[in-house]
Amino acid sequence: MQSSSHPQFVLPISRPVMRFGENEPCELRSVDSTLELTNDDFETIVNICNEKLIYNRLFKERFNRSHRLKGDIRLKNVV
């Protein structure tokens, strides 16, 4: 039996989660390049990425410790 060099997932992946702090049931779903995002979606993504804990964990070293993501996230290939 041969195995691939990368995982093979059946998409989309969907998992139930509880929203932290509010105990509200939500769904976490995978996305791919076929998902069309609006400008509001990109603004939401930037705002989430700029939250202190998330930014420090994911972007601080990559962006030379600058304080926040700026500009058009679509052009920066951050996501």
Image (cartoon, rainbow, N blue to C red):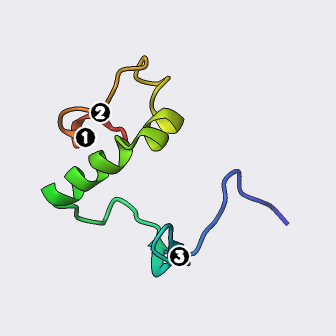
Q: CA distance from mark 3 to mark 2?
A: 27 Å
Mark 3 secondary-structure assignment: strand
Mark 2 secondary-structure assignment: loop
Q: Nearer the viewer, mark 3 or mark 2?
A: 3
Would you say 7 lies left or right of 49 here? right
Q: Position of residue 27 (x, y in %)?
A: 46, 78
Q: Quadrant of the N terminus?
A: bottom right
Residue 72 found in image quarter:
top left
Q: Residue furthest left?
A: 39
Q: Quadrant of the C terminus?
A: top left
Residue 14 in sight from this viewpoint: no
Mark positioned earlier in the residue sequence (3 or 1): 3
Would you say 48 lies left or right of 29 here? left
Q: CA distance from mark 3 to mark 1?
A: 27 Å
The residue where tag 1 is placed is 73
- Would you place residue 9 above or below residue 69 in this image? below
Marks 1 and 2 in Cβ contact (< 8 Å): yes
Q: Residues within 10 Å of mark 1 (few under 14, many from 20)?
A: some
Q: Nearer the viewer, mark 3 or mark 1?
A: 3
The residue where tag 2 is placed is 69
Q: Residue 21 got which mark?
A: none
Which residue is depicted at the point 64% across and 65% down?
8
The residue where tag 3 is placed is 18
Q: Nearer the viewer, mark 1 or mark 2?
A: 2
Mark 1 secondary-structure assignment: helix
- The residue closer to the viewer here, 60 or 29, is 60
- Disc 2 residue type (three-letter): Leu
- Disc 3 residue type (three-letter): Met
Q: Residues within 10 Å of mark 2 (few under 14, many from 20)?
A: some
